[in-house]
Amino acid sequence: MQTDSYRHKGMRRGLIKVLQEKGIRDPRVLAAVEAVPRHFFFEKAFLEQAYQDKAFPIGEGQTISQPYTVAFQTELMQLKPTDRVLEIGTGSGYQCAVLLQLTQQVYTIEYNRPLYEKAVMFFKKYGLKPHTFHGDGSEGLPAHAPYDKIIVTAGAPGVPRSLVRQLTLGGSLIIPVGNEKSQKMMRITRVEEGEFTREEFHSFKFVPLLGKSGWDSTL
Ligand code: SAM
């Protein structure tokens, strides 16, 4: 079990300043990022990297997302404490830990088995209680739908229809969409029964979303 020292807290405050300079404004999102010790998600040898605004390898060819990306996606979600959230791509569990600062109802699904098992152990160790699932989340998690918010933390080739169908009325899906080199962040909101609005934000670079509605249709 790692500890959260004054030095780490100071480094986190430095990171919050960087996020503010890059345009993150929502005080609840900034407080959520400040509350989560990102160094807990790193091996001891790499602690210095934990509070740089950078993605970092977590094994299995995957990454823990850049803090700015986590804050940006979380800000777009405009979470309420009563929201039911689905996260697709648990990865290290860091984004999930940030979401849990803002709502207690987080469902998270990871496709890669070793990463899924590592994240489950991590959540247990630190007393975090998301609902965890292993499998292909590219078509959501229909058994527990609908969700007020869905966040996809891997780059998708398009907006999977099955995901928008799992939104509540007024709910939104935050998803990076594009090719393998660059993806535009999108927010799709279900405004009426068959009516959706689509907003497009700037570009990011994510690892690919795999699975049936992702880049690997052979699953
Ligand atoms: N949210 C993560 C974090 O905070 O560490 C970032 C995860 S990483 C950028 C993207 C993750 O999506 C990887 O762990 C990858 O295995 C997972 N992934 C890719 N395709 C998936 C799918 N179809 N269903 C569920 N997870 C998937």
Image (cartoon, grey):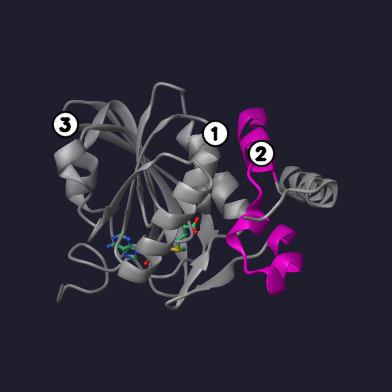
Q: Residues within 10 Å of mark 1 (few under 14, many from 20)?
A: some
Marks 2 and 1, how far apart at CA: 8 Å
Tell me the magenta residue range: 23-52
Residue that carries the numbered disc 1 in the rendered image: 101
Q: Residues within 10 Å of mark 2 (few under 14, many from 20)?
A: some
Residue 39 at what x, y percent from top left?
A: 67, 58
Residue type at numbered disc 2: Ala
Foreground disc of the pair 2, 3: 2
Rendered-image quadrant of the N terminus: bottom right
Q: Identify which residue is drawn at 22% across, 32% down.
A: 146
Residue 144 seen in the current view: yes
* Nearer-the-camera pick, 86 or 185: 86
Tell me: 201 left or right of 89: right
Earlier residue among tags 2 and 1: 2
Residue 69 at what x, y percent from top left?
A: 57, 53
- At numbered mark 3, what does the secondary structure look like: helix, strand or loop? loop
Residue that carries the numbered disc 3 in the rendered image: 194
Question: Is 35 in the magenta?
Answer: yes
Marks 1 and 3, how far apart at CA: 32 Å
Residue 37 at what x, y percent from top left?
A: 66, 49
Q: Identify which residue is drawn at 46% across, 36% down.
A: 77
- Contact between labelled residues 1 and 2, with CB atoms less than 8 Å apart: yes
Tell me: 124 left or right of 160: right
Residue 128 at what x, y percent from top left?
A: 47, 41
Residue 35 is labelled as 2
Residue type at numbered disc 3: Gly
Earlier residue among tags 2 and 3: 2
* Nearer-the-camera pick, 64 or 121: 121
* Nearer-the-camera pick, 28 or 144: 144
Foreground disc of the pair 1, 3: 1
Q: Identify which residue is drawn at 17% across, 72% down.
A: 217
Tell me: 148 left or right of 49: left
